[in-house]
Amino acid sequence: MRAFTTAAIQVAPVPGPLSPETVRKNLDKCVDFVRRCVDATGAELVVLPETATTGFTPDCSTEELWDLVSEVPGPVTEPVQQVARDLGVHVVLGTYERGPERGVVYNASVLVGRDGEVAGVYRKTHPFCTEHVDGGGWVTPGHDVTVVETDLGRIGMIICFDGDYPELSRIQAVRGAEVIVRPSALLRSADVWELTSRARAYDNHVFVVGANATGTDPAGVLYFGNSHIVTPVGHIVAKAASHEGWVSALLDPDTALASLTPGSNIGQGFDHLRDRNLELIRRHRAELEGEARTTFPH
């Protein structure tokens, strides 16, 4: 991983019932915010909230939602792919994704590379109880762990409630993730939002970039924002308020551990521990990947 600037953008969904027009307007807003954010901050990695193309609670049937979104890549990602290509930056977009048959909808995080191509897709493995299709919701869970190799570093991908589960982030760290992006539409509390991002960063010595929704979704649910960027030692180095906008920070692996408390045993022998863990990864990769698959059964 090299040093680079990242930004977390928080945008509000367009008010009103979901329609092709509101999805288009949400995409237009995402593109506009990405352009303005990159112009203002020079960010090379920009993270948008969970389900930024629709808002989290769709307030329609799963079949209707399936009709309104698209496959990935597809119309629901094309405007963001174009702005990433225009600006030469990486963009993470949260969107609902059309599954293989009508009524199967995934809650997806899409990493678009500098060339505008989709570099990785992660489908939420831990849908919140209200969104899970088995509980009367609209989301079918995904099954795969996603870590993407980029020219910035290795980027792991989780979505909102996934951050409550240490195992997913741990698997990503074992697979080499240096930054974990967390598009979210978190509702429970700002304390839980901050606690879980800081814990996942500290657990795994990775940066966490959390972009949380703000405003009101199609069902009238309100979101509090508070997007943040967390260092590998759990420090929040950038934090937003509740209105639309962005926060940014320089992620520098060479200084990430510089703020450890003097005498802390976390930093002592860190290189040795890192080397030991890498050796374990090399020796047991097959077993670890097998565990990853069984963690999220079909």
Image: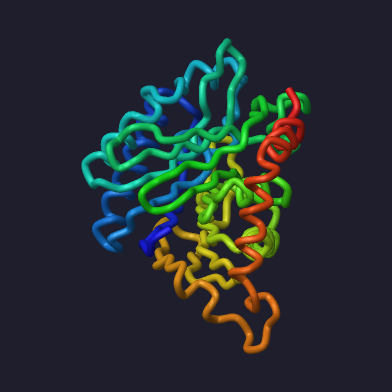
**Residue for point 33% across, 32% down:** 117
The residue positioned 36% from the left and 23% from the top of the image is 75
Looking at this rendering, what residue extends furthest in the top direction?
101
Q: Furthest-bottom residue in view?
A: 262
Q: Nearer the viewer, residue 145 or 90?
A: 145
Quadrant of the rendering where the N terminus is positioned: bottom left
Visible residue check, residue 127? no
Can residue 150 be seen in this snapshot? Answer: yes
Left or right placement of residue 216 versus residue 197 in this view: left
At x 67% / y 88%, what residue is drawn?
263
Vertical order, 54 against 243 (above or below): above
- Tell me which colouring the rendered structure shows: rainbow
Where is residue 129, by image quadrant? top right
From the viewer's perspective, is residue 254 above or below residue 105? below
State the image coordinates of residue 278 (x, y, percent, origin top left).
Answer: 61, 54
Picture mark count: 0
Instruction: Report the front residue among 87 and 251.
Output: 251
The residue lying toward the viewer, choosing from 19 and 31, is: 31
Vertical comparison of 105 with 240: above or below: above
Query: In the figure, residue 118 lies in which quadrant?
Result: top left
Where is residue 165? Give x, y as percent: 73, 48
Q: Position of residue 250 (x, y in %)?
A: 39, 67
Horizontally, residue 199 falls left or right of residue 86, namely: right
Residue 264 horizontal side relative to residue 58, left or right: right
Above or below, comparing residue 96 to residue 281 in the picture: above
Q: What residue appears at the point 43 percent right and 52 percent down from the top-left corner?
A: 153
- Quadrant where the image shows the C terminus: top right
- Pick the residue in front: 213 or 85: 85
